[in-house]
Image (cartoon, rainbow, N blue to C red):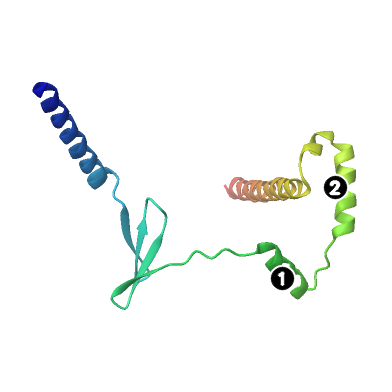
Amino acid sequence: MNREKIYFAIGLGAGILLTGLFLLYFAPRYETTQVDKTLIKQDRWSGDSWQYVGNKWQKIVDVQRDWKKIDQALLNALHIQSPGIERNEALAILRLKAPDLEVLTDDELLERIKYVYSKEIMVTLYLRSFMEAEKRKNGGE
């Protein structure tokens, strides 16, 4: 019985030692960096952050914003009318022409349109610029 207790104690001690070494060297909790003369400390386990101000650490507060309300205020400030009716009608017609889009909500469909359309514009602009540069390079030789 004493032999089992000794093995248990050795295993428990080794486990505690290995856990402590792992947490100390391989998984440090806090990471401190300097950004624009401001010292920032981040808790890598919870994601909380602090900045060093006035010889003490002050927590950086994560702000949750109501983006829909802010977007609507921005649309009003920029005098852009909300295209709700035309948009809904256009999305309905689009879904009729492409039945695979029926599974998406309006917001998901609008996000995908934004992604695909902007990607195509950016790729086309880049390739056009690349081809013009190649023509200038080949024409200049």
Looking at the rendered structure, which numbered label has been put on residue 74? 1
The residue drawn where x is 73% and y is 46% is 108
Foreground pick, 122 / 100: 100
The answer to whether 41 appears left or right of 116 in the picture is left
2 and 1 marks in contact (CB < 8 Å): no
Label 2, secondary structure: give it. Answer: helix
Residue 29 horizontal/vertical position (percent): 31, 52
Tell me which amino acid carries mark 2: Leu
Which residue is situated farthest in the bottom direction here? 54
Q: At 80% across and 69% down in the image, what residue appears?
A: 80
**Which one is earlier in the sequence, the residue at label 2 or at label 1?**
1
Indicate whether 42 appears above or below 133. below
Residue 128 horizontal/vertical position (percent): 68, 48
Q: Where is residue 46 in the image (x, y as percent from the top left)?
A: 40, 53
Residue located at (60% from left, 45% from top): 138
Towards the viewer: 65 or 17: 17
Name the residue that disc number 2 marks: 91
- Which dot marks residue 1? none
**Residue 135 in the figure: left or right of residue 80:** left
* Residue located at (71% from left, 49% from top): 111
> Amino acid under label 1?
Leu
**Distance (Cα) linking label 2 and label 1:** 23 Å
Q: Quadrant of the N terminus?
A: top left
